[in-house]
């Protein structure tokens, strides 16, 4: 039994030593990885700083000048004028199409309202309102006229 206890103790001690060795190796690898990450981070920061400097200086360093002779300039102007004329024609054509679509839709709406005019009571209600409104105006104005006439006779 004491032999088994000694074997178990030795096995436990060996396992503990191997575990401590593995932990130390892990910590060394972690330190190396941290150093590598720090190095890469510094290099990326340096690259970003260089890019920022290039972008700051780009407007002053990237000046482009173009020399165009008169014949080429004239061709460019002619092409631009043709393109503008074509674009204007296309826009006018689209505007005409849209206007004709609106006119067709207006005609369709008028036809729809003509179809429903015979059964729509809104038209009759409007005439009914105007009839009694004008009668009311004449009655009120007549009453005011009678009052004024009576007041003037006194």
Image: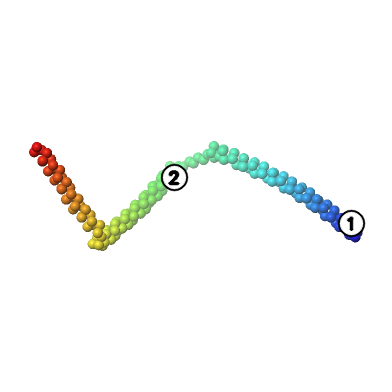
Work out whether residue 149 or residue 13 is closer to the camera in this orientation and state it.
149
Q: Position of residue 142 (x, y in %)?
A: 13, 45
The residue that disc 2 covers is 72
Task: Note whether residue 93 is visible.
Answer: no
Q: Is residue 138 left or right of residue 21?
A: left
- Residue 6 - label: 1
Label 2 and label 1: CA atoms lie apart by 101 Å
Residue at left 85%, top 53%? Answer: 13
Q: Position of residue 96 (x, y in %)?
A: 32, 54
Q: Is residue 8 left or right of residue 146?
A: right
Label 1 sits on a secondary structure element that is helix
Q: Position of residue 133 (x, y in %)?
A: 19, 50
Residue at left 16%, top 46%? Answer: 140
Quarter of the rendering occupied by the C terminus = top left
Residue at left 80%, top 53%? Answer: 19
Residue at left 64%, top 41%? Answer: 46
User: Which is in the foreground here, disc 2 or disc 1?
Assistant: 1
Which residue, as the protein is rendered here, is positioned at the far right?
2
Which residue, as the protein is rendered here, is positioned at the far left?
153
Q: Are marks 2 and 1 in contact (CB under 8 Å)?
A: no
Task: Note whether residue 79 is visible.
Answer: yes
């Amino acid at each position: 039994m004491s032999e088994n206890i000694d074997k178990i103790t030795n096995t436990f001690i060996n396992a503990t030593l191997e575990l401590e060795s593995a932990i130390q190796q892990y910590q060394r690898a972690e330190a190396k990885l941290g150093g590598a990450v720090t190095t890469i981070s510094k290099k990326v920061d340096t690259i970003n700083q260089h890019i920022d400097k290039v972008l700051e200086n780009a407007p002053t360093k990237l000046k482009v000048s173009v020399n165009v002779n008169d014949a080429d300039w004239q061709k460019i102007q002619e092409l631009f004028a043709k393109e503008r004329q074509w674009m204007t024609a296309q826009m006018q054509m689209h505007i005409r199409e849209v206007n004709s679509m609106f006119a067709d839709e207006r005609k369709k709406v008028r036809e729809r309202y003509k179809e429903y005019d015979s059964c729509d009571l809104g038209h009759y209600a409007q005439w009914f309102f105007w009839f009694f409104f004008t009668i009311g105006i004449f009655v009120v104005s007549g009453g005011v006229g009678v009052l004024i006439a009576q007041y003037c006779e006194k």
